[in-house]
Amino acid sequence: MAARPNRPVGPDGRPLTPEEQADLERLELIEQARNSRRWAYFATFIAFLAAAAAAVALALLLSTDQSSGRSGASRSSVRDLQDDQSKLEDRVESAREASRDAEGSVDSLTSRIDDLESEVQSADGPDESTQREVADLSQDVQQLQEEVDRVGRDADSGGSSP
């Protein structure tokens, strides 16, 4: 009896049972959720570093101005610094929101994985509904990964601007 081409096979060459296939997919989804959570933490860390770098730069600028004998910064310089600080704070907040959204998505995906596990255990084999849910879940995880990657890139580009 030949295995269907779209069914994965185990290490011994036999097709996986629906339960084994569901376990394999569940493990892959859990790993994707962990990776997404790591990217969310990374984006938050980068945003924090950007805010800290801005604070250090501002402190250095102020100490340099004071040590050079100037009486104070011009109003336009202060306004420019305030604008820069405001932009950095907005970026940090955006990164934090993206991180919270990603964590919420991870929690939601984890819940869906648990629900799918319960359905797989109670069913003799995966039905069409379960397969659709697994496919939807995989797509959601992929979209979440892309969003986290985008947030990471945004945070990286935000940390390098003057």
Image (cartoon, rainbow, N blue to C red):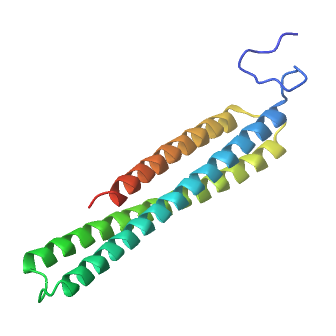
Residue 115 at what x, y percent from top left? 71, 51
Residue 109 at what x, y percent from top left? 61, 52
Q: Residue 85 occupies which quadrant of the picture?
A: bottom left
Image point 67% across, 34% down: which residue?
A: 131
- State left or right for residue 146 relative to residue 50: right
Residue 83 at what x, y percent from top left? 19, 70
Residue 99 at what x, y percent from top left? 48, 61
- State left or right for residue 2 relative to residue 44: right
Q: Residue furthest left?
A: 75
Asked whether 85 or 122 is in front, the reply is 85
In which quadrant of the rendered image does the N terminus lie?
Answer: top right
User: As displayed, is residue 61 above or below residue 108?
Assistant: below
User: As displayed, is residue 4 above or below residue 28?
Assistant: above
User: As displayed, is residue 52 above or below residue 143?
Assistant: below
Q: Which residue lies furthest to the right in this view?
A: 12
- State left or right for residue 69 relative to residue 32: left
In which quadrant of the rendered image does the C terminus lie?
Answer: bottom left
Image point 84% across, 22% down: which residue?
A: 15
Using the rendered image of the protein, determine whether residue 125 is visible from the camera's viewpoint.
no
Q: Residue 139 occupies which quadrant of the picture?
A: top right
Q: Residue 106 occupies which quadrant of the picture?
A: bottom right
